[in-house]
Amino acid sequence: MEFEQRLDRYAEVVVKIGLNIQPNQPLSISAPLETADLVRAVARKAYEAGARRVEVEWADDILSRMRFELAPEDSFQEFPKWRVQQADEMIDQGGAYLFVSGSDPDLLKGIDSARIGTWQKVAHGAMQRFHRATTTMKVSWLICAAPTDAWAARVFPEVPAAERISRLWDAIFEASRVSGEDPAAQWAEHIQQLHQRAAKLNDMRLQELHYRSTQTDLTVELPQGHLWIAAASKNDRGISFVPNIPTEEVFTMPKKDGVNGVVHSTRPLSYAGTLIEDFSLTFENGRIVDFQAQNGREALEQLIATDEGSHFLGEVALVPYESPISQQGVLFYNTLFDENASCHLAIGNVIEVCIEGGGQMSPDQLQAKGANQSLTHVDFMMGSADMDIDGTTPDGRVIPIFRQGNWAL
């Protein structure tokens, strides 16, 4: 199959399955400059689906790094009001958001972590309404990916430079389930299977999960009324969308003060332009009380120190070790892909729809239910081939959920 045909299919999956663009709906796209081919293909598909307008905000890694190197210190305390107004307008109009991932995983290596941390806090604080709209699924949104030179070089350093982009495209197409003859049908079946997994877990009303491997021994209490979520969600207008392409996870929320033990990462975490590798976290009563990292320790410390809520977890996600992405044998250095090749946890804010009625709850109500709240939400990978997970039911039964890294249900 020619590249143009596969790109067209990918754009169609993004627009029709991921975003599910509706007639007269505006679309906002944020993307690296190097991903223009995908952005143009998506824009065409969106207009063909009836989009009212497609607005694109381009990003450039060189300019992004330049700012952190050269801009005045106090400039990181400012956030443009027009960006907030633009996001508010899109929310009010029922618009959809597309975020194309592809930046250099090492983009901000060597940059003062205090600058990065300050900007993260300021940006998250200014865009709270937007973040709330996405975590409550009020608006349709999607993260997908397209190759850039720097990312492709990180993933395939042994491949000749002229072939790296093509190799990464192949991996993305395969992971995103667009390589078959009927991607739409394949996606419909995949979504149904993930929803069946979530329904089975919801029927169990588990009180606790216990993770065990050679490096991890962690118990995670689940709050009463928690919900397992997978694949497709519905926005506040009742329109279905899939927030991540690819997606292999079934996820829910932990009880904020119910996490105890030690968890060890199994894949690098690209955070704020820095790779954090071979790290561990120790929890007591939900709180991170100790951490170690072979590389990127300063960035990990900055992440944990974002605010009070970043000392706790906001998500637990189950992904089989033998997922299609894992079976590719590719380390993507990109959370969108690596989190769908491994069980993972998230430091920071809860996804509100993971508890009954959470989308309509106030912050105080969420807190009373055991939900963590933070300005950040960062997934990290901790699944492995030797991971066993047990679930404990309200009547005290222990049910195998994972054995040797894969579903035991």
Image: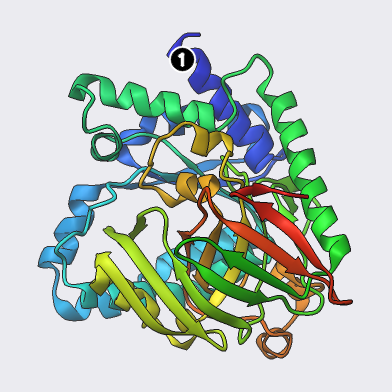
Residues 97 and 339: in front is 339
Q: Is residue 228 visible?
A: yes
Residue 261 relative to residue 187: left or right? left
Three-letter code, disc 1: Glu
The residue that appears at 20% across and 81% down in the rendered structure is 74
- 173, above or below 326, in the image: above
Count of numbered tags = 1
The picture places residue 274, in percent across and down from the top left corner, at: 26, 60
Q: Residues within 10 Å of mark 1 (few under 14, many from 20)?
A: few
- 158, above or below 225, in the image: above
Residue 160 relative to residue 390: left or right? left
The picture places residue 353, in percent across and down from the top left corner, at: 72, 67
The residue that appears at 35% across and 66% down in the rendered structure is 279
The residue that appears at 23% across and 39% down in the rendered structure is 150
The picture places residue 406, in percent across and down from the top left corner, at: 64, 46
The picture places residue 299, in percent across and down from the top left corner, at: 28, 70
Please identify the residue farthest to the front as the structure is shown: 214
Residues 44 and 367: in front is 367
Please identify the residue farthest to the top as the structure is shown: 1
Is disc 1 placed on a helix, strand or loop? helix
Q: Is residue 129 visible?
A: no
Residue 199 relative to residue 103: left or right? right
The residue that appears at 72% across and 47% down in the rendered structure is 232
Q: Which residue is mark 1?
A: 4
Residues 44 and 335: in front is 335
Q: How is the image coloured?
A: rainbow
